[in-house]
Amino acid sequence: AQSVAQPEDQVNVAEGNPLTVKCTYSVSGNPYLFWYVQYPNRGLQFLLKYITGDNLVKGSYGFEAEFNKSQTSFHLKKPSALVSDSALYFCAVRLGGSQGNLIFGKGTKLSVKP
Amino acid sequence: EPEVTQTPSHQVTQMGQEVILRCVPISNHLYFYWYRQILGQKVEFLVSFYNNEISEKSEIFDDQFSVERPDGSNFTLKIRSTKLEDSAMYFCASSESGVGSYEQYFGPGTRLTVT
């Protein structure tokens, strides 16, 4: 069965420092991987995706994520965190080539302090 | 930038009542989805919809649930007889294509509280 794990419930970072939000996945084929962000009282907002090609993908607001097939990971990163990055981050997977639904991780709360 | 919209933002209902949650997907999108998130738990897939019929549904989407696209813009989720465990945030999403590489765009959600 497909699954996504986000091992950290919360990540705390000081403003200006690099941040990493971890995600690992389990699928039986080639995955399509996504990161979404949820601000308070807002819907899930698409950040970036990995489909194929370069393992480092860049997305909105300076975020990037690195696909690592051997470690089955897709960690979200940003070189310099902003207080405004504080939100709930969700990793999601979909089996490559499918038209199926997204499978989400449980979410990681990112808190960036000034 | 086009957005998925959902109404109402919060719905309170009594157990056994019917509720209809409404969504307006992005206008040129063809695939529509409902997900739900029980407080403190994962976002879970309920159903996908294309060309006026259900494409896929999860185990959660039982006979109490139905979806409809009553006109060219709205996409609705109906729960016929609500249970306490239906209390959750319900998200509507749409995508331009059903191909797996296309991202889904989510609405802000409707918080359903069943008392």
Image: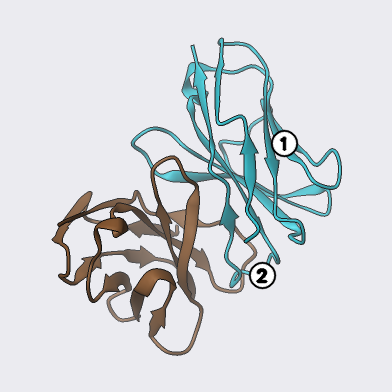
Pointer 2 or 1: first along the chain: 1
What residue is rendered at 80% in x and 46% in y?
A: B73
- From the viewer's side, name the closer residue of B86 and B59: B86
Q: Quadrant of the N terminus of chain A?
A: bottom left
Question: Which hue is chain B drawn in?
Answer: cyan
| Residue located beneath label 2 in the image | B99
Secondary structure category for the residue under label 2: loop
**Which residue is label 1 attached to?**
B76
Q: Is residue A29 visible?
A: no
Give me the chain letter of mark 2: B
Residue B77's place in the image compared with A114, above or below, is above
Quadrant in the rendering for residue A76? bottom left
Q: Residue type at mark 2: give it.
A: Val
> In terms of secondary structure, where does tag 1 sit?
strand
Q: Quadrant of the C terminus of chain A?
A: bottom left
Q: Amino acid at mark 1?
A: Thr
